[in-house]
Each structure stands twice: as C-alpha cells, then as structure tokens.
Image: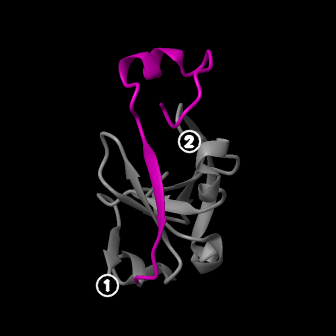
Amino acid sequence: MSQFPMTDSRRSILERIPDYEVRVTATDSLINVRYGDLLIADTTSALLIHETRHGDVYYLPPKDIDWSLLEPTELSTYCPFKGHASYWSLKGEDTLENFVWSYRNPYPEVEELKDYMSFYTDRVEVKAG
C-alpha cells in the first residue's frame, strides 16, 4: 500500500510511481551549512529525508538557521508528496537566490518537515560530521 493516499492532484504521479516513499529520520549528527566562510546554519537536530528517486537530503530546524542572512523570495514550488515549498535567498548575493526551501504546511504524511529548512547542496556546503 502506498504511503500517499490517491487524490486527484496525485493521481497521475501515483499511477506512474505507486510505491513512492518519503522517509523522515531524526539525526543527532552535527550538520553545518556554509557558503564559503559564512556559517548559515549549525545543528544537531536535523532530519534526514530518504526519498524515492532522490538523494538523501538534510532538513534543519528553523531555530538553528541564521535568519539575519536570509530573505524570502516569491518562488513557490509544488511537490505531490510533500506540498508547496517556499524559498529564501542569501541577502545581497545575486548568485545565491532560492537556495533554501521549506514546507510551511506539508502534507500529513510528512508533517515532521513543517518549517524545517533544506539547502541545495550544489550551491552551498552541507556537511555532516
């Protein structure tokens, strides 16, 4: 049985990938997010997301993000498994737009992601250790 209920908005994707899964695992590993020498986030309370057809991704709690470095953008995307994502850019840095996202109201199947933040690892260094 699929983790995700069949709805009209999910029908086309679930018919193609009926066994799609998003697993959320808490980790106490130290996770740092850096842009060069700039420390953007630092936590031991991350979530590790294992998602079908994607590499593993860390999501960090909002309390461990340096919000003074970020500004919200107008970008919004939709994932049929997690919901609508909001994005942020690094203040004053044109080359680092929309590099962090969050699901403010994720679907119930992944409610643990609510307000946690994730980062594009091809644009910033996300280091576990």
Q: Earlier in the sequence, mark 2 or mark 1?
A: 2
Please tell me in which quadrant of the rendered image residue 69 appears.
Answer: bottom right
Q: Which residue is mark 2?
A: 82
Q: How many marks?
A: 2
User: Badge 2 local density, few (<14 within 10 Å), some, or many (20+)?
Assistant: some
Q: Which mark is residue 27?
A: none
- SS for callout 1: loop
Alpha carbon distance from label 2 to label 1: 27 Å
Magenta span main SS: loop
Residue 57 lies in the magenta stretch: no
Is 40 left, or right, of 8 in this rendering? left
Q: Is residue 32 above or below residue 25?
A: below
Amino acid type indicated by mark 1: Gly
- Residue at 59% across, 62% down: 116
Q: Which residue is mark 1?
A: 129
Residue 28 lies in the magenta stretch: yes
